[in-house]
Amino acid sequence: MASTVIVGAFWGDEGKGKIISYLALNDKLDFCVRTGSVNAAHTVWMEGKRYALHMVPAAFINEKTRLLIAPGANVHVAKFFEEVELTKVNGRIGIDKFSSIIEEKHSLQDRTSAHLKGLGTTGWGVGPALEERARRTAKLAKDIPELKQYVADVTKEINDGIDAGKNVLLEGTQGFMLSLFHGTYPFVTGRDTGASAICSEAGVGPTRVDDVIIVFKAFITRVGTGPLPGEMSKEEARKKGWFETAAGTGRDRRSAPFDFDLARKNARINGATQAALTKLDCIFPECRSVRNFDELPKKAIQFVKEVEEKSKISVTLIGTGPAALDIIDRRK
């Protein structure tokens, strides 16, 4: 592992935080760079404690990993300080000087603007903040006095790290079907969420990336409004054990079975070199905490092979429980 992009395959909530936290520990990440914005929380379990992180990269679980927020990201200052205190990463996290700032006025606009009503936004203010950045009037991290000690040249750090053969992970947020350009428009977020956009926000050229890991969940969920092919009722989702609430907002997640055609399409567009498949234990409870592929029940193995065959990509990491190390690692 040298430089890797993590991208969500569907409408978010695929378990990217879990995969990132596993890689942080197992692959001994040197750098983890968060792209995107505050709206998408990544869930990490450490020592029985659950962390839902909006700003701090999920790789915080490794105390030796340098944590960075990309120049293309948006920073919610209060949430940043809250999470720095929660995760105790004060001495090893940096924000690029060109990261833009979400202000209170943006949150207010997000909650009250007529053209955003009905789109299912989180209300954090991400869309209005991105609008202001496009107008070239946004405040940047370098303009905020209380962020002074955290301001860094993130692009230089990570490209120097790649040159030195360090392990660098670019952490995408949300899911590809929420992409402004490729998702279910207009029920999308305010930016592209694909692998190429993750590289662009971080300042890493595409030829400097070694792997793109697309994260599938064994079933599909979506919060907010917009289409969800194959959507089942909340009652049916509860019966199957697929009903969830969003880690960051607490909103109900709508559920649907795994979509093989969509998985194949999105793996192709993102140039995925391998796939991670999370929450296999929600489909097959007997898989809980299994860490050897051969020990999976026959039906679970058949499901993984069907995902590989129909999506045209190898499933190398399989999540079998919430803990960071509840993973079957088939990369070797």
Image (spheres, rainbow, N blue to C red):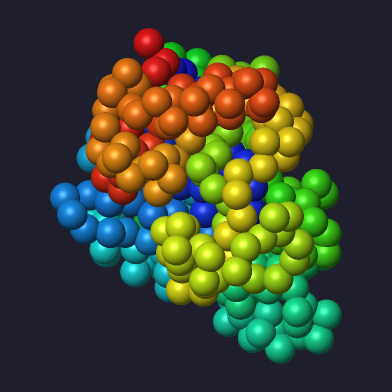
* Location of residue 55 by image quarter: bottom left
Q: 182 or 216: which is nearer to us?
A: 216
- Residue occupying image coordinates x 34% and y 63%: 83
- Residue occupying image coordinates x 63% and y 21%: 309
* Location of residue 265 by image quarter: top right
- Residue occupying image coordinates x 28% and y 59%: 50
Q: Position of residue 224 (x, y in %)?
A: 64, 71
Q: How many marks?
A: 0
| Quadrant where the image shows the C terminus | top left
Asked whether, in this view, residue 313 is left or right of residue 29, the answer is: right
Q: Outermost residue toward the left?
A: 47
Q: Tell me if residue 225 can be seen.
A: yes
| Quadrant where the image shows the N terminus | top left
Q: 53 or 13: which is nearer to us?
A: 13
**Vertical placement of 294 versus 219: above or below?**
above
Q: Outermost residue toward the top?
A: 332
Q: Position of residue 145 (x, y in %)?
A: 46, 67
**Vertical placement of 211 versus 87: above or below?**
above
Q: 67 or 50: which is nearer to us?
A: 50
Q: Position of residue 175 (x, y in %)?
A: 62, 49
Q: Position of residue 144 (x, y in %)?
A: 51, 67
- Residue occupying image coordinates x 76% and y 62%: 227
Q: 148 or 122: which is nearer to us?
A: 122
**Vertical placement of 312 versus 17: above or below?**
above
Q: Tell me if residue 25 can be seen.
A: no
Asked whether, in this view, residue 309 is left or right of residue 293, the answer is: right
